[in-house]
């Protein structure tokens, strides 16, 4: 072996991401010297992942920069990123940049030499050097092996080629590059199979659905998340997963992957990227042990992980499942070689979650720096709390009784998708599973970790009975109690950060990383910050701005707009934005606000509108639009239906759909066709595209229904005709019920009206029945439809003037408080009722059906195609 | 969110340098560049240096964009409120969104589908998407838009 003087940094393999680019731009530093520099020891870290870099951070936090000259080798050509969040990247919820934990600057700033994209292939413990692929060697005084794991590829015929490479359309799920290849490949495909029904498999399945794929989960085990869940809980999870549209094949043994010859030159794959199969052909289906087949376009393998132990083997270290360590996280064979993370085996355990790795990294750092030579790791009890494919799951310890004396308490409500169980041994919690409702997980994890005494009434472990005192509040939590399980942040760390002067919740989250993993602990983090700051929490000032580009909250902005008579979006930027700079992300919200303030006197600049409001239709994923004509109250006529049918045929509309708001949606209309479609329909716009008043849903009411006590249909139609299309901070969906049976779902609408016996009407506000479910609050009970009309309008105007941008009424009403709203809107305690009524009347008077723009377009090329060479629609025709 | 955030200016400068270097490389590649274009990546568009006349600038409302088919490519031309013109690929590299339908300001365009943000001068994405190709665009003496691809 030769020691080279200067080793070039291997260029990154992809070179397109900003992160990758930045790394290859880090100047190659002078290669290590033969002797330690300035008395510092050479510390070499193999593995630039979550455990390795956490260990380095812990070492630096203990004055390690004075002790060590650090070199980090990483197989992946990037800085360290949060692997947990790859699921989010796949699902499109996070961008790649958001998941980076350590930027290239971090390495430079801390004097760490990063050899990203360089794989360590050899370890010579006698010469004390590691060797890389290109034959260069690097000496060390201390070595940390943190090589993590790789995806396990089961020995299924056709799944791998002779060198372990995957055929086309087959992917592992472990790295950013895996994610990228999957995302690049998924577009335009129809079906995907995920092999493996564990945590990773389900996350992959959910992520793939984002790309419109029909997803099958192939699980050799009889139960989903077999490792954590018993059969019953697994069954409930399965129902939840299937409700999302994922098909589960439990107990399915894959006999072989069916391959087709590679079609080359289809332009979909890019020089050697994963997914192109490298000559092995392309996966087209699966064949199961029972002979049945499933046609698929892509396969994701999530069948478990295997520790990367090669470096240990090369160095002659003891390797069983992982590289075997002592309690100081050193190899049992060599006191100068530390092992941390998923590649380490400690007291027979190999961990596959991050929480234990943090503990290992701390012990390692305490020991290697000499800060605490007695530091010892005693193993971790792992508790998982996460959202799997949208279902909340918390699991720890045993999933079921194992001893005859084990005590099990179980609550199951399959219809709600709720499963809760605890396993108790000798009065201590030794296992717990929560599915669907994980409200009790924090206290259970504490009881499990610390062996706390349990309440005699075991049910209290599963539910908050009586007073909420049973909940472990921020104040009572122990300092070392872990709050963020993803990033291993304790309550103590959060408190210290607040005491150190950080007074905003986002600031604390950024500084400690608490809440930056799966996000399920955010509420708790916020509570702790508030508690620690003793009520002195500062809001991030920009969090209160109405829009990012103008530093003012909504009332201040509205006052400035009125005072300075700013009637157009560009006038607002010129007068109120820093340096008068316009900001694309602020335009839509400003347009809405100006319209509310100025009504008909608003100066309409079309670039201030979102595309939906420019062309009065809702943009779809392929760039076509959906068209929903106004059908007030959901009441239509044969003549209207006939016209809708004719239009659908004439313009080959790919899908005609009845909406949840009792309207008819024509989906997949080309932009150029919109004016013609509106003309042929000859109906007003149904406003199914803007942040505005959309629909009033009604039941049939007393004319037809034998239970009806009020004419809900007539009232619903009247409300919609009066207020429809008015812009508002968030969309408005209303309903009128003819009786308390609530068939039109008035209790979960922004405004819901319910006829009750005696000719009276109840008005509910702030309800929601979408991603968020909330029953509306009763605003008032009134005697006539006229009063309903007035109070509805007055509340709408109050919300229009005071709601934050995109704040739906279900947030607005509890934020302001129903009592306050009732005081203003019903009792007129502030004396503004007449003004509110007058201002909404102005907006109503200024209303003009936007679909009339079919005759005189508002701007040149308003309806011109924006993808002139793409033949639309690209959505499937039904 | 906003790409005009001043704290990112240092990285933006670096990004600009990278893009211009990239551009030089692609234009200078000559006949051999055909292979790259065939890969079909968003920024790997064919560049011949040819000037194309698109139409009168009045076709584009101030502050908005319109898309043009130019020699088999789709290009979105933005007419900035501040007075300039910008030409970039019309198709969002994220999932094919129509960028001419996006909201824009003097610096960036936001894709209407998933809100990725792209710098109109460099094509770089502030939100982590792949970069867009950028093209020189200007006005001929007669007020006709001219783009060089
Ligand atoms: C999609 C996904 C979701 C997850 N979700 C969760 C979750 O919700 N909760 C949870 O607790 N855990 C989760 N995990 C697991 C968690 O990410 C891992 O436990 C953690 O990343 C392990 O850290 P590590 O440093 O040991 O390994 P890694 O993070 O894998 O780092 C090891 C690094 O070493 C590099 N390397 C390997 N061999 C060499 C070599 N010879 N030379 C140079 N470099 C090498 C690898 O390329 C890699 O970058 C998830 C994992 C995935 C893939
Ligand atoms: S298509 Fe442009 S952001 Fe998704």
Image: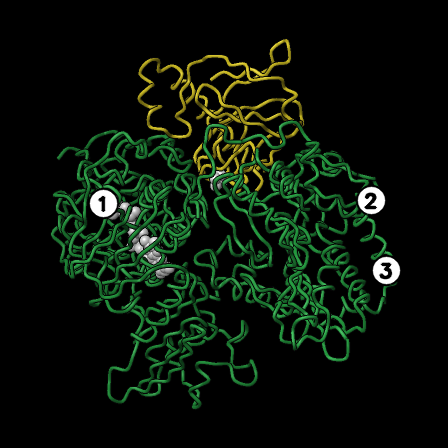
Chain colours: A green, B yellow
Q: Which mark is residue A431?
A: none
Frontmost of labels 3 and 1 is: 1
Q: Indicate the quadrant containing the N terminus of chain A: top left, top right, bottom left or bottom right.
A: top left
In the foreground, A153 or A717: A717
Query: Is residue A309 visible in the rendered structure shown here?
Result: yes
Rendering coords of residue A132 (x, y %): 20, 38
Which chain does tag 3 point to? A
**Same chain check for tags 2 and 1:** yes
Which chain does tag 1 point to? A
Q: Earlier in the sequence, mark 2 or mark 3?
A: 2
Residue denoted by label 1: A283
Other-residue count near label 1 (Cα within 10 Å), few / some / many at <14 / 14–19 / ≥20:
many
Distance between the alpha carbons at the discs numbered 2 and 1: 63 Å
Above or below — where is A656 with respect to A442?
above
Residue denoted by label 2: A562
Q: Secondary structure at mark 2?
A: helix
Residue denoted by label 3: A832
Q: Is residue B48 left or right of residue A630?
A: left
Q: Secondary structure at mark 1?
A: strand
Rendering quarter of residue A324: bottom left
Q: Is mark 1 within 8 Å of ligand 1?
A: no
Frontmost of labels 2 and 3 is: 3
Frontmost of labels 2 and 1 is: 1
Rendering coords of residue A498 (x, y %): 56, 60
């Amino acid at each position: 072996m030769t020691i080279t003087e200067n080793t070039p940094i291997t260029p990154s393999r992809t070179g397109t991401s900003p992160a990758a680019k930045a790394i290859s731009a880090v100047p190659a530093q002078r290669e290590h010297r033969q002797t330690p520099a300035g008395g510092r020891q050479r510390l070499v870290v193999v593995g630039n992942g979550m455990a390795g870099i956490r260990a380095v951070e812990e070492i630096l936090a203990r004055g390690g920069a004075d002790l060590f000259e650090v070199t980090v080798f990483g197989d992946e050509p990037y800085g360290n990123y949060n692997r947990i969040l790859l699921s989010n990247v796949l699902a499109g919820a996070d961008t790649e940049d958001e998941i980076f934990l350590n930027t290239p600057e971090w390495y430079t700033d801390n004097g760490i030499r990063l050899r990203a994209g360089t794989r360590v292939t050899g370890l010579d413990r006698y010469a004390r050097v590691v060797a890389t692929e290109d034959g260069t060697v690097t000496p060390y005084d201390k070595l940390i092996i943190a090589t993590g794991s790789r995806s396990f590829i089961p020995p299924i015929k056709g799944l791998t080629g002779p060198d372990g490479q995957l055929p086309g359309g087959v992917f592992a799920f472990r790295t950013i590059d895996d994610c990228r290849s999957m995302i690049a490949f998924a577009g335009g495909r129809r079906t995907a199979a995920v092999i493996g029904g564990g945590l990773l498999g389900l996350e992959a399945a959910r992520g793939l659905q984002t790309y419109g794929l029909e997803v099958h989960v192939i699980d050799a085990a009889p139960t989903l998340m077999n490792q954590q869940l018993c059969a019953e809980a697994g069954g409930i999870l399965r129902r939840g997963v299937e409700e999302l549209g994922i098909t589960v094949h439990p107990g399915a043994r894959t006999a072989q992957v069916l391959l087709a010859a590679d079609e080359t030159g289809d332009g979909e794959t890019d020089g050697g990227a994963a997914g192109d199969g490298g000559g092995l052909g392309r996966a087209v289906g699966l064949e199961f042990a029972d002979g049945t087949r499933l046609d698929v376009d892509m396969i994701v393998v999530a069948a478990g992980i295997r520790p990367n132990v090669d470096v240990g083997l090369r160095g002659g270290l003891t390797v069983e499942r992982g590289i075997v360590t002592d309690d100081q996280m050193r190899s049992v064979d060599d006191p100068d070689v530390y092992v941390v993370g998923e590649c380490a085996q400690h007291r027979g355990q190999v961990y596959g979650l991050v929480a234990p790795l943090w503990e290992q990294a701390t012990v390692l750092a305490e020991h290697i720096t000499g800060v605490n030579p007695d530091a010892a790791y005693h193993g971790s009890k792992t508790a998982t709390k996460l959202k799997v494919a949208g279902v909340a799951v918390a699991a720890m310890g045993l999933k079921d009784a194992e001893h005859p004396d084990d005590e099990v308490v179980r609550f199951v409500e399959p219809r709600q998708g709720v499963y809760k169980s605890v396993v108790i041994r000798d009065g201590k919690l030794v296992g717990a599973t929560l599915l669907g409702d994980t409200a009790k997980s924090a206290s259970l994890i504490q009881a499990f970790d610390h062996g706390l005494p349990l309440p005699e009434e075991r049910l209290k472990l599963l539910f908050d009975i009586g007073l909420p005192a049973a909940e472990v509040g921020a104040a009572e939590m122990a300092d070392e109690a872990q709050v963020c399980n993803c990033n291993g942040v304790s309550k103590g760390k959060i408190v210290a950060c607040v005491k150190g002067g950080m007074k905003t919740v986002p600031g604390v989250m950024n500084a400690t990383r608490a809440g930056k993993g799966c996000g399920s602990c955010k509420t708790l983090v916020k509570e702790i910050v508030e508690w620690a700051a003793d009520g002195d929490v500062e809001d991030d000032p920009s969090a209160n701005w109405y829009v990012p580009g103008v530093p003012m909250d909504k009332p201040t902005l509205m006052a400035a707009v009125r005072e300075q008579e700013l009637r157009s979006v560009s006038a607002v930027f010129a007068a109120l934005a820093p340096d008068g700079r316009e900001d694309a992300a602020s335009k839509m919200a400003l347009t809405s606000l100006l319209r509310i303030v100025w009504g008909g006197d608003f100066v309409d600049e079309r670039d201030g509108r979102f595309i939906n409001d420019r062309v009065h239709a809702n943009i779809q994923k392929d760039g076509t639009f959906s068209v929903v004509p106004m059908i007030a109250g959901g009441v239509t006529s044969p003549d209207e239906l006939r016209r809708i049918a004719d239009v659908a045929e004439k313009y080959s509309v790919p899908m005609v759909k009845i909406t949840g708001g009792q309207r008819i949606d024509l989906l997949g209309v080309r932009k150029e066709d919109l004016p013609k479609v509106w003309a042929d329909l000859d109906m007003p716009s149904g406003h199914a595209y803007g942040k505005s008043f959309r629909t009033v849903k009604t039941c049939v009411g007393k004319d037809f229904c034998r239970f009806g006590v009020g004419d809900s249909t007539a009232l619903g139609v009247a409300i919609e005709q009066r207020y429809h299309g008015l812009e508002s901070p968030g969309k408005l969906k209303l309903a009128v019920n003819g009786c308390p049976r609530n068939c039109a779902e008035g209790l979960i609408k922004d405004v819901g009206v319910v006829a009750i016996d005696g000719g009276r009407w109840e008005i509910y506000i702030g309800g929601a029945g979408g991603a968020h479910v909330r029953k509306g609050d009763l605003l008032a009970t009134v005697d006539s439809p006229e009063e309903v009309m007035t109070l509805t309008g007055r509340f709408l105007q109050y919300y229009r003037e005071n709601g934050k941008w995109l704040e739906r009424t279900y947030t607005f009403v509890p934020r302001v408080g129903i009592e306050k709203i009732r005081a203003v809107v019903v009792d007129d305690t502030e004396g503004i009722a007449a003004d509110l009524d007058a201002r909404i009347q102005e907006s109503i008077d200024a209303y003009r059906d936007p679909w009339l723009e079919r005759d005189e377009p508002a701007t040149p090329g308003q309806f011109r195609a924006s993808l002139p060479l793409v033949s639309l629609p690209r959505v499937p025709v039904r | 969110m906003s790409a005009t955030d001043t704290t990112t200016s240092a990285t933006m400068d670096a990004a600009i340098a990278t893009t211009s270097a990239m551009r030089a490389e692609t234009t200078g590649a000559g006949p051999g560049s055909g292979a790259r274009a065939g890969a079909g990546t968003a920024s790997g568009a064919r560049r011949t240096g040819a000037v194309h006349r698109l139409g009168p600038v009045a076709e584009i409302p101030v502050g908005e964009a319109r898309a043009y088919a130019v020699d088999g490519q789709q290009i979105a031309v933005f007419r900035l409120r501040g007075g300039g013109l910008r030409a970039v690929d019309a198709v969002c590299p994220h999932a094919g969104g129509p960028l001419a339908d996006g909201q824009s300001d003097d610096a960036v365009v936001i894709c209407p589908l998933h809100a990725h943000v792209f710098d109109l001068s460099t094509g770089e994405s502030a939100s982590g998407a792949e970069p867009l190709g950028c093209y020189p665009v200007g006005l001929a003496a007669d007020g006709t838009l001219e783009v060089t691809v």
